[in-house]
Amino acid sequence: QLTDALHVFDEMGKFGCRRTLRSCNRLLNQLVQAGDVGTAVAVFEQMRCDGTLPDEFTVAIMAKAYCRDGRVTQAVDFVQDMERMGVEVNLVAYHAVMDGYCGVGQTEAARRVLLSLESKGLSPNVVTYTLLVKGYCKEGRMEEAERVVREMTENEKIVVDEVAYGAVINGYCQRGRMEDANRVRAEMIDVGLQVNLFVYNTLINGYCKLGRMVEVEELLQEMEDRGVRLDKYSYNTLVDGYCRNGSMNKAFGTCDMMVRNGFAGTTLTYNTLLNGFCSCGAIDDALKLWFLMLKRGVAPNEISCSTLLDGFFKAGKTEKALNLWKETLARGLGRNVVTINTVINGLCKIRRMVEAEELFGRMKEWRCPADSLTYRTLIDGYCKIGDLDRATQIRVDMEHLGFVPSVEMFNSFITGFFVARQSGKVNDIVVEMTAKGLSPNTVTYGALIAGWCNEGNLHDAYNLYFEMVEKGLAPNLFICSALVSCFYRQGKVDEANLVLQKLVGTNMIPDCSASTLDIGKVAHVIESLAGGNHQSAKIMWNIVIFGLCKLGRVSDARNLFEDLKVKGFVPDNYTYSSLIHGCSASGFVDVAFGLRDAMLGVGLTPNIVTYNSLIYGLCKSGNVQRAVSLFSKLQSKGMSPNAITYNTLIDGHCKDGNTTEAFKLKQKMIEQGIQPNVFTYSILIHGLCTQGYMEEAIKLLDQMIENNVDPNYVTYWTLIQGYVRCGNMKEISKLYNEMHIRGLLPANGTGHVKHADPVVICKQPECKYGQC
């Protein structure tokens, strides 16, 4: 009807009909209410051309129009122009200007307007002061907001109402300052005002955001006792609070209560529940809710679709996610950029890039333009599989369309270079990133630190750690885990201990290198780091147990494990695997098997890594036959031996002097589709050399090379040691030359093979190398 009204307004002008001021004001007001400020300004200009003089109502409407459009300065100029023209300006117009100032964060300017009112013959009222209170609250200046409320109570002409107090309470709740909110609430009651539904909703929302559901339920009981009924906002806030807290039964029960009390659940309500179920891994319940939502006639939106699809992808139920996606499309939903990005992201996470690209191509067919997130997601997917050529091409296409590279995109490329073993280019991408005015964030440092740690470059990783701390960025659990794991892998115990001590000094990781382990102190550090996240705390405890085992402190690891169980720690596969490997490597094989049984007893399934550790422990302790027996039972346990399994058992047979069985295992390995690697051949060559079968060992070296498996320094060093024992210097010379050709000798030509066993001094007089 507004369109019709505008049409009549135009027709009246064409036929010379006089437009009354009252009808023009009504039209202006409706336009401003509808948010059509541009048309309102055009109508006002037409009024002036027609000679229709504005009145105080016109001024108030137009001041509100300019302020709603964010043009506060223009609103002030307009009001001043009207004053100069002699048009009366009422308090409503000044309220509009004050509200405009507060909306753009200029509450002090709004206060100056308030102070100027009396000189204009106008008296500020409760609305005037309340606007100022809301402005200060919006800026977070809570003390000033309370000062204005006190001014109101001290002014005999002003009667303070619940709105002003509610604004202050809301301001404190928004900032999580619940004690201050309750203090103001008590003051509100002391001056004789009743706590209304708005204040209750504000307090409930504040407590829900903090996860303090006990206080929420106390407020609900108080509301029931006082006869204050919940509204739709109350129910939605409660549903969100219970979902945040993981109390999904209560969240769903609240939704049902909402429906029973006559409030239809909205799409927002169901989206909150969907997100709650998906966040806690209850995907089946989320799917049931989806169908209930449809049954109740609540239309899903792009957020609903995206939330459910993302939940399925994160739960690893890819096929179910894709089937749901097809159903969603069949219902006429899902052809929007938010939902499509979710599916592309899910496919990229599991490296199904061909399907992700196909969906990306269909976006053009559906006339759904890709946004920057679409391109970033594809870039990230390709970087994670090391396909930097395709990632770079997508980046070029993205920038051609006007999308600006982001920190997230550069983070993906950093990860990509490490994955593609092109770490030499990492510094270049960081330089380019900073040249574009983008500052590295925590994720950037995480990618760099994890990358260098994986390459064993602890020096650069450690320097980056302190660089980010100096910049005020807090290292997260991922970064600390990468560093700690790298320290243990290095095998440099003294250096690792020094570094660990420094990190303990910054309260970032626990001190598990000290001679005694203060469980209370370690627990405090871990809980602080995890920030209440039990899964994060478990990861850190697992790292400590792994680290102790790696340092050979298996007894300490076992004692810590038992203490943690008493404190409620629930061990997982990683915990048991670390302990089983540590015990097996340290010769406590029976203890390792006991841990395996305990693992089964709590419903955990040992994987092939666990059984590899047990087989290794048995072989190391000389119980090769028992290891063979365990190996033969793997298939019945649903386990498929891998290269490490075969190599471990082959090594056990070789050390037991049974090379015949070792070679049988090599053949079986091939029959199972597992190709022998450099470790397999090196172990067998070592077994042959130990028994003096040098001719067979050389034949195996030739076979190894024929099968495109490159020998390493251990392979050659084993053969050299074998020939030293039998005094064949001619063959040693040939092997030495081969090592030189393959680049397996240090550049200085000293003859010392890096990382090899202790050098064997050759006693043969004809040896021209001095040391072999």
Image (cartoon, helix red, strand yellow):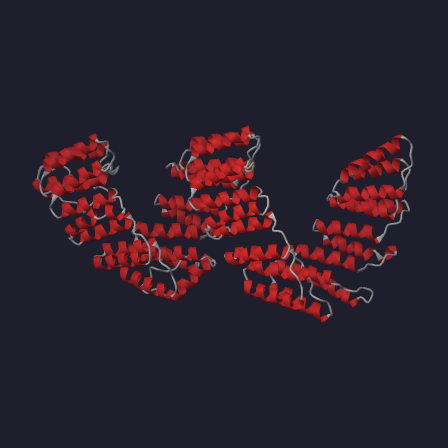
In front of the other: 349 or 366: 366
- Quadrant the N terminus occupies: top right
Residue 77 seen in this snapshot: no
Instruction: State the residue in front, 611 or 389.
Output: 611
From the viewer's side, name the closer residue of 319 and 207. Answer: 319
Count the labels in the image.
0
What residue do we see at 9% from left, 41% from top? Answer: 692
* Residue 643: image location, x then y, percent: 25, 42
Q: Position of residue 10 (x, y in %)?
A: 84, 33
Is residue 238 rendered to the left or right of residue 637?
right
Q: Position of residue 62 (x, y in %)?
A: 81, 44
- Residue at 42%, 44% in the rendered image: 316
Residue toward you, 259 or 195: 259
* Image point (13%, 43%), residue name: 661
Q: Is 667 left, or right, of 145 in this rendering?
A: left
Location of residue 689 by image quarter: top left
Q: Quadrant of residue 678?
A: top left
Residue furthest out toward the bottom: 190
Horizontally, residue 20 falls left or right of residue 175, namely right
Residue 39 in the image: x percent, y percent? 78, 37
Identify the residue at horizontal 39%, vertical 52% (top origin): 481
